[in-house]
């Protein structure tokens, strides 16, 4: 081989080797870039998913917060309406009590309650009180029941109160007590379970 041929062969071999090395380096660089791209895509997807989860959780919190505020508003409105209805109902109950007290049946009711109290006391001393409102009925009820009655210093709408001192017993058949007990214990129960 001549020098010229050797040079050509050396040149061709060197160029071929350089080309192979360059292709190898380019391929390694391309693989490295592809791996970096895949890693970047993976991280971006994870970040997007994480961000989406955080946004969903935040949206749920905001919805729950708004829902709680609305429920509180509804509960307050419901309670206020119940309170107004309760006041209206018990104002009507009070009217009906006063209407009953104007009827003849009221005196019969008082006579019955007085007799029940006397029977309960048996032979013990008993003091029976009428409400201030019943002052006009005091004499007629004393005559009808044959029992001495007293007028209370306080008003208890109507009915009677009786005291048996020896047994330390108070019999409270006053309308005020019944009215107040009903008012305290009254609840609006609703829904299918209470129909």
Image (cartoon, rainbow, N blue to C red):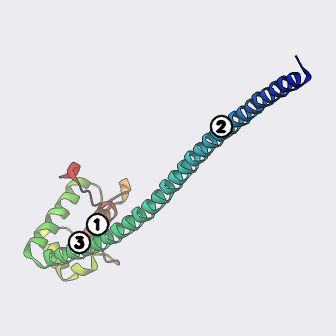
- Disc 2 element: helix
Q: Is residue 190 left or right of residue 36?
A: left
Q: Quadrant of residue 105?
A: bottom left
Q: Locate residue 102, reporting x and y percent.
A: 13, 79
Point 89% across, 20% down: residue: 2
Q: Residue furthest left?
A: 104
Q: Are marks 1 and 3 in contact (CB under 8 Å)?
A: no
Which mark lies nearer to you, 1 or 2? 2
Q: Are marks 1 and 2 in contact (CB under 8 Å)?
A: no
Mark-to-mark CA distance, 2 and 3: 80 Å
Q: Is residue 71 left or right of residue 43?
A: left
Instruction: Residue under label 2, please give it.
Output: 34
Sequence-wise first label, 1 or 2: 2
Q: Is residue 15 left or right of residue 68?
A: right
Q: Nearer the viewer, residue 177 or 24?
A: 24
Q: Locate residue 36, reporting x and y percent.
A: 69, 39
- Disc 3 element: helix
Mark-to-mark CA distance, 1 and 3: 26 Å
Sequence-wise first label, 1 or 3: 3
Instruction: Residue under label 3, please give it.
Output: 89
Q: Locate residue 77, reporting x and y percent.
A: 35, 70
> Compared to 2, does 123 lie above or below?
below
Point 38% across, 64% down: residue: 75
Q: Is residue 146 visible?
A: no
Sequence-wise first label, 2 or 3: 2
Q: Residues within 10 Å of mark 2 (few under 14, many from 20)?
A: few
Q: Quadrant of residue 127?
A: bottom left
Q: Residues within 10 Å of mark 1 (few under 14, many from 20)?
A: many
Mark-to-mark CA distance, 1 and 2: 98 Å
Q: Quick one: quadrant of the N terminus?
A: top right
Instruction: Residue under label 1, please give it.
Output: 161
Q: Nearer the viewer, residue 127 or 66?
A: 66
């Amino acid at each position: 081989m001549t020098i010229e041929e050797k040079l050509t062969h050396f040149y061709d071999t060197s160029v071929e080797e350089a080309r192979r090395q360059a292709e190898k380096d380019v391929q390694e660089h391309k693989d490295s870039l592809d791996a970096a791209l895949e890693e970047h895509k993976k991280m971006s997807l994870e970040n997007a998913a994480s961000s989406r989860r955080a946004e969903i959780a935040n949206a749920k919190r905001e919805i729950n917060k708004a829902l709680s505020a609305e429920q509180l508003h509804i509960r307050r409105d419901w309670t206020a309406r119940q309170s107004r209805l309760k006041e209206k109902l018990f104002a009507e109950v009070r009217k009906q009590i006063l209407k009953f007290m104007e009827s003849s049946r009221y005196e019969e009711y008082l006579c019955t309650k007085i007799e029940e109290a006397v029977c309960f006391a048996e032979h013990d001393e008993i003091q029976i009180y009428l409400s201030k409102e019943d002052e006009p009925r005091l004499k007629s009820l004393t005559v009808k029941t044959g029992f001495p009655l007293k007028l209370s210093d306080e008003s208890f709408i109507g009915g009677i109160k009786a005291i048996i001192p020896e047994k330390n017993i108070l019999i409270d058949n006053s309308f005020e007590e019944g009215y107040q007990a009903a008012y305290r214990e009254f609840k609006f129960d609703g829904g299918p379970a209470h129909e």
